[in-house]
Amino acid sequence: MQVAKKARKYKQNLASDNFYGNKLAELRADAANAFRELSSQSVGDTTALAELLEAVFAPQTIAPKRLTASRELVYALRTTWKESKEKSLAGEEGLFPLTILVQANRGYLVTIGRQMNGCFTQGWHDACAVMMRRLIEVSIIEAFEHKDIARKIKGTDGNYVQLTDLIARALSEQALPLSRNAKKQLPELRDVGHMSAHGRYFLARKEDLEKIQPGCRIVIEEFLHHAGLLTTT
């Protein structure tokens, strides 16, 4: 709004190649990046927010409309979206550090991890174990693909094998030198995931997941390193 006001004061066209037009373009890019991060974590009306952003940052927007849109945007961010953001941050805490998955720079890993952690904090322990199972499966596949040995975990039909076989092949694969702790924890993680997914009478409890939490961190992080998605600093 300050850029737009100063552009009007000095009779500069925001759609032209000048200081104020270029500054608005930079702010628009920053807003787009912030919106992308926010919308990936929130459950609010992304379409309505996107329309407000467009009205505020588009160079051709007339002054009265820009003012109205900016006020509506501030209100939305401080109410509906603030609440949604706070709820989504519950996914930051849980079974696995979400920051590690963010560092891996794979949106689907972050989404799986957020669902897993969200289930953990909500007390949906079987659902959490199933999502953990999926995260391990994806991490193993990422590692094999990065090493260019994905063929070793595919069946005759060309599809990837099931988790039990994935783990067995990962444990014996020389191109993926796993630590002693990872080799020990992998079968335990597999069993909890399997029981939560397929056990007729098994119901996972919080203590079941807390017991395997350190192993979950070790195993997934090692596979993501082997997948070239994490770097040692």
Image (cartoon, helix red, strand yellow):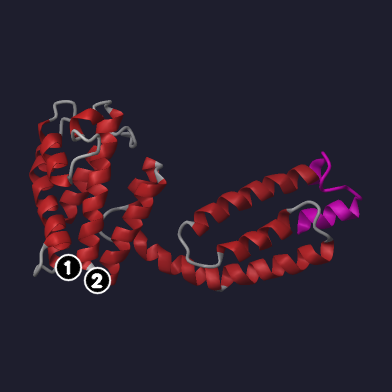
Identified by mark 1, the residue type is Lys
Residue 33 location (% of width, % of height) = 57, 49
When the figure is inspected, residue 197 is found, relative to residue 161, above or below; the finding is below
Task: Please name whichever residue, 47 or 159, is drawn nearer the observer in this view of the structure.
Answer: 159
Residue in view at x 63 percent, y 72 percent: 75
Q: Secondary structure at mark 2?
A: loop
Residue stretch in magenta:
1-20
Asked which quadrant contains residue 103, the reply is: top left
Residue 69 location (% of width, % of height) = 72, 66
- Pointer 1 residue: 206
When the figure is inspected, residue 108 is found, relative to residue 201, above or below; the finding is above
When the figure is inspected, residue 117 is found, relative to residue 24, above or below; the finding is below
Q: Quadrant of the N terminus?
A: bottom right
Question: Quick check: is 16 in the magenta stretch?
Answer: yes
When the figure is inspected, residue 213 is found, relative to residue 85, above or below; the finding is above
Residue 86 location (% of width, % of height) = 44, 68
Task: Please name whichever residue, 20 or 195, is drawn nearer the observer in this view of the structure.
Answer: 195
**Circles 2 and 1: CB distance less than 8 Å?**
yes
Q: What is the tally of numbered marks visible in this picture?
A: 2
Residue in view at x 22 percent, y 58 percent: 130
Identified by mark 2, the residue type is Gly
Residue in view at x 25 percent, y 51 percent: 134
| Relative side of 141 to 206, left or right | right
Task: Please name whichever residue, 213 or 172, is drawn nearer the observer in this view of the structure.
Answer: 172
Label placed on residue 123: 2
Residue placed farthest to the right in the image?
11
Residue 127 location (% of width, % of height) = 24, 64
Q: Secondary structure at mark 1?
A: helix
Residue in view at x 66 percent, y 59 percent: 53
Asked which quadrant contains residue 219, the reply is: top left
Note whether residue 9 is visible: yes
Task: Please name whichever residue, 56 or 18, is drawn nearer the observer in this view of the structure.
Answer: 56
